[in-house]
Image (tube, coloured by chain):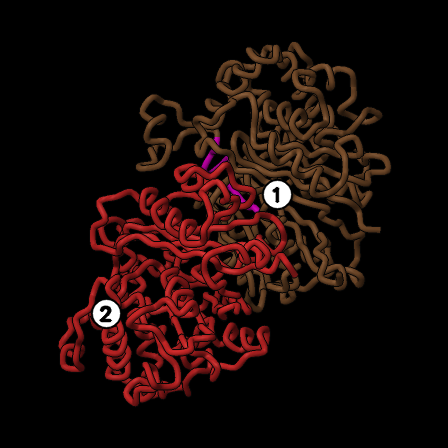
Chain colours: A brown, B red
């Protein structure tokens, strides 16, 4: 089908601890770069989608800022990294359905100098799920994730050192990524010496809050033929919002959305986990890398520490996990930078950190009961 | 195609000035009714989408509340009535693309007892467009719309009496709608005697803020074959987010999103405005009915007052505009109740207010630079 949607452009700002810019300015920068990367003019843009938590600029404003002649489709999603792959998948559906021809998916945030996700902002949500947990001080993602991590440790015997292996490997990868905010290598001693954020999670287990924006551009396969880069195809997307219905409780705390989305992704695409060359696993915490590797079927349950220790998650191993250093080291652009990296790798444009013959990339997004995974391939 | 998406169920709560219920409870009630109306169990639900302004319950929570086994697709859109048709159109795309099989689109709000859209809530948005207009007290939809209305009056010679004709006709329709919150007929004297909200808009020009929820259920044409009601097909949807990029300014204030979405809807569907039997025109204010009737091509520019006066917008005329009384009289369920009414009419289930041989319905959503329109037909 000529309307098959493909990713044809990527763009981003510098990632920093203090951008000194508005989220509108950051979004416009990333959007302009992504469109230029594809070979489009701003006036070609007729679709846009983002996700935010009232901390960023809407598609309407970004489109206007860069000189779009108006959008024929847009989504302004209220939510976090759980939407980081589905924002792309929905843009793809819109292109496929003919709602628009050139769609932008972006995330822009001042996640360090502005609203920080790792901290409670003092405002208790009235009527939401936090009304029950909040009064007990149970308010932030590291607190939730710490409880899940502890449950996993008790059930499967995973250890802090297992998490440490993930943190160390990703920082090692970031050393080759000039865009990463943290590039200094760490040892297990460094990891274990890191301060507690919420036990059993240490500072090195937590995504690096940064300011910045990231964007990808999609269009139809037909229009992509005239463009500059190798197109990247979306082989499939699967998301799941669990039966627990909240961030605080669901039937099995050692499991995540991926227990359902993982198998569904393979069923939808007809591919297998063993075929994945690059795995950009959502790493708001090391813990989410662990559980999604298990549940997307890249590693046996409880064996993730060993998987990293044996070098199976890096160059020369089974699969390269987060070659850019992920959210832990490159920076927390709320997960959309995982798609950026996957596209870069599939194009063969990742330079010093290029994964050899990268043909298939898995990108995941989200944590706990709610998230998704997307399988990307270079379209040659 | 067997995956062609159709609307198969509708549900709603009572509409009132004080529900005494949470938006989660209201959403769950409407969702349960819509699923039951279709003939689905709650466990069949695997997709959900809503739009809100941080005043309502997310798809994750609603799905859990009613007993869904989890969602495979969801959108939690941050926005107003501008999304009232696109929330349905996006659900349709998701069904068509196979992201889910049974999708709910809903809107739940305590729009009278909770957050009222017609009032400034005291919180100036920092960094948003209101940072420039807000300090001057230019904060609420009736203020914006009043300026646009004045511009239309100066440019096209439309009058307050023209707006009055719309208000009178819709209240006349509401008299036959037991679900409407306001059913008392009004005369032109009543209308002109109404108090100013923002000159030239009077109380009767403004949508009736109410509490309540409304939901529609979509599935594939194939699954619809076994269900209870006549399916309703989405012939097309067109939305436009204008080049102005804000609520405060865009090139022509006498025009709206519909100047682009209108012609595009007819181009996409191959149908003509003259074929429409039922027009559910988004009426946050009488003014939006006026301009969308012009720009979707149902009436000549500047002739809308006469169009209503001559009975062309009611039973026996060219098209029945808002047979339920619309947001002005039935209540402001943020526009999704327009889709509910269109489905009811196309099924032939509208009782006393049934439009004879209703085969084609236009539903519009939004105001100013941003909104959409959707064409629905009974699938016989």
Q: Residue at left 34%, top 68%?
A: B350
* Circle 2 residue: B198
Residue stretch in magenta? A107-117
SS for callout 1: loop
Tag 1–tag 2 contact (CB < 8 Å): no
Q: Residue at left 52%, top 74%?
A: B260
Marked residue chain, label 2: B
Residue B36 - label: none
Q: Residue at left 45%, top 54%?
A: B38
Tell me residue A163's x, y (percent): 63, 17
Compared with B307, A310 (above or below) is above
**Nearer to me, A181 or A192:** A192
**Nearer to me, A196 or B60:** B60
Compared with A217, B301 (above or below) is below
Please identify the quarter of the rendering in which residue B2 is found. bottom right
* Circle 1 residue: A85
Query: Can residue A62 be seen at all in this image of the molecule?
Result: no
- Of badges 1 and 2, the one in the foreground is 1
């Amino acid at each position: 089908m000529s309307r098959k949607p493909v990713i044809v452009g990527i763009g981003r700002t510098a990632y920093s601890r203090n951008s000194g810019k508005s989220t509108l300015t950051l979004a416009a920068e990333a959007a302009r770069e992504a469109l230029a990367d594809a070979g489009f003019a701003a006036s070609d843009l007729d679709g846009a989608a983002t996700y935010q938590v009232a901390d960023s600029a809407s598609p309407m404003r970004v489109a206007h800022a860069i000189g779009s002649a108006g959008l024929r489709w847009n989504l302004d999603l209220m939510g976090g990294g759980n939407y980081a792959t589905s924002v792309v998948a929905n843009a793809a559906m819109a292109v496929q359905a003919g709602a628009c021809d050139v769609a932008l998916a972006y995330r822009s945030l001042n996640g360090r100098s502005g609203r920080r996700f790792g901290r409670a902002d003092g405002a208790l949500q009235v009527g939401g799920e936090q009304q029950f947990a909040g009064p007990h001080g149970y308010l932030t993602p590291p607190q939730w994730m710490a409880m899940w991590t502890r449950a996993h440790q008790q059930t499967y015997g995973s250890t802090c050192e297992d998490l440490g292996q993930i943190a160390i490997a990703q920082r090692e990868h970031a050393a080759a990524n000039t865009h990463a905010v943290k590039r200094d290598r760490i040892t297990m001693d460094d990891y274990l010496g890191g301060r507690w954020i919420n036990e059993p999670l240490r500072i090195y287990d937590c995504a690096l809050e940064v300011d910045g924006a990231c964007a990808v551009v999609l269009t139809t396969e037909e229009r992509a033929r005239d463009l500059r880069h190798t197109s990247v195809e979306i082989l499939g997307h699967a998301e799941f919002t669990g039966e627990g219905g909240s961030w605080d409780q669901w039937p099995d705390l050692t499991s995540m959305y991926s227990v359902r989305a993982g198998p569904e992704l393979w069923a939808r695409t007809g591919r297998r986990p063993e075929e994945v060359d690059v795995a950009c696993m959502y790493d708001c915490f090391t813990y989410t890398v662990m559980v999604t590797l298990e549940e997307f079927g890249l590693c046996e349950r409880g064996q993730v520490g060993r998987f990293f220790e044996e070098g199976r998650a890096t160059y020369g191993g089974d699969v390269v996990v987060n070659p850019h250093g992920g959210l832990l080291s490159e920076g927390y652009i709320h997960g959309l930078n995982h798609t950026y990296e996957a596209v870069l790798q599939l194009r063969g444009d990742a330079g010093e950190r290029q994964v050899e013959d990268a043909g298939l990339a898995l990108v995941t997004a989200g944590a706990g009961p709610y998230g998704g995974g997307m399988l990307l391939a270079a379209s040659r």
